[in-house]
Image (cartoon, grey):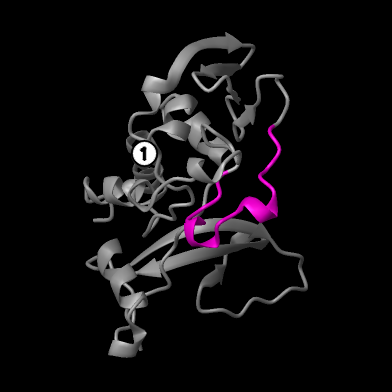
């Protein structure tokens, strides 16, 4: 029998008087509440837990299922303490936001859901201005990005309308590393797709501070 050495409560749920709960990952408390708990070995690090979970073929078994979460962009914008414009356009800033909230919430791993950005993106900025709670960026390509304080940015053309995606006949499958409809250029040209070295930039930045202890 596994001897757990630590436990944390994830949620408290009300129960009706006729419900019975039988699970190894919860306990029925007083006053009609069920507590969803997370049990783990205090001496097992998140890095070790993730490593074991990803190598079952080698006979490794984690002390519990690792916990990860793909948070919404708006959540990063509102809670990381970094400017939304930087989180969206800068690989290092997005990596810092990922690490900050991973540590705050105690996740075992980090789900990177955006590709890396052009490290010279600031050189293409013509101007920035506040518009209500959003930030508006104008680029040398005569495009505009509207960055809300709590939602995904959107790219507009010179006519201030959303850009149309390229025609299917114009797409080269060998260059489809990742189609990002909201990056600086939007989905406007095959040449605008980020190269592989940019895509991996966030992963490299996340590894630098050894965020998963």
- 81 lies above or below 113: above
Q: Secondary structure at mark 1?
A: helix
Depth check, front residue: 3 or 132: 132
Q: Position of residue 205 (x, y in %)?
A: 28, 45
Residue 59 in view, yes or no: no
Looking at the rendering, the stretch of residues picked out in magenta corresponds to: 163-180
170 within the magenta span? yes
User: Count the marks: how many?
Assistant: 1
Query: What's the residue at 70%, 20% (across, down)?
Result: 160
Query: What's the residue at 54%, 33% (across, down)?
Result: 185
User: Residue 48: which quarter of the image?
Assistant: bottom left
Q: Position of residue 112 (x, y in %)?
A: 43, 52
Q: Position of residue 194 (x, y in %)?
A: 44, 45
- 207 lies above or below 83: below
Quick check: 147 left or right of 209? right
Q: Position of residue 2 (x, y in %)?
A: 34, 84
* Disc 1 target residue: 91
- 44 lies above or below 61: above
Residue 186 in view, yes or no: yes
User: Residue 67: which quarter of the image?
Assistant: bottom left
Depth check, front residue: 159 or 81: 159
Quick check: 10 left or right of 121? right
- Say which quadrant the C terminus sits in: bottom left
- Neighbor class of circle 1 (other Cα within 10 Å; few <14, some 14-19, many 20+) is many
- Say which quadrant the N terminus sits in: bottom left
Quick check: 28 left or right of 20? left
Query: What's the residue at 60%, 54% (across, down)?
Result: 171
């Amino acid at each position: 029998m596994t001897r757990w050495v630590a436990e944390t409560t994830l949620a408290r749920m009300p129960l009706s008087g006729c419900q019975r709960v039988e699970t190894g990952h919860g306990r029925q408390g007083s006053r009609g509440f069920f507590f969803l708990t997370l049990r783990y070995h205090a001496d097992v690090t998140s890095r070790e837990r993730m490593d074991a979970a990803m190598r079952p073929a080698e006979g490794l078994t984690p002390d519990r299922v690792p916990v990860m979460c793909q948070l919404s962009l708006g959540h990063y914008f509102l809670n990381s303490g970094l400017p939304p414009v930087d989180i969206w356009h800068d690989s290092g800033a997005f990596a810092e936001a990922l690490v900050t909230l991973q540590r705050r919430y105690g996740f075992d791993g980090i789900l990177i859901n955006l590709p890396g950005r052009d490290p010279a993106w600031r050189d293409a900025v013509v101007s920035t201005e506040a518009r209500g709670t959003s930030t508006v960026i104008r680029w040398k390509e005569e495009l505009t990005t509207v960055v809300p304080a709590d939602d995904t940015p959107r790219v507009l053309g010179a006519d201030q309308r959303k850009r149309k995606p390229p025609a299917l006949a114009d797409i080269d499958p060998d260059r489809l590393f990742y189609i990002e409809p909201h990056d600086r250029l939007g989905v406007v040209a095959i040449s605008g797709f980020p190269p592989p070295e940019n895509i991996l930039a966030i992963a490299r930045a996340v590894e630098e501070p050894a965020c998963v202890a």
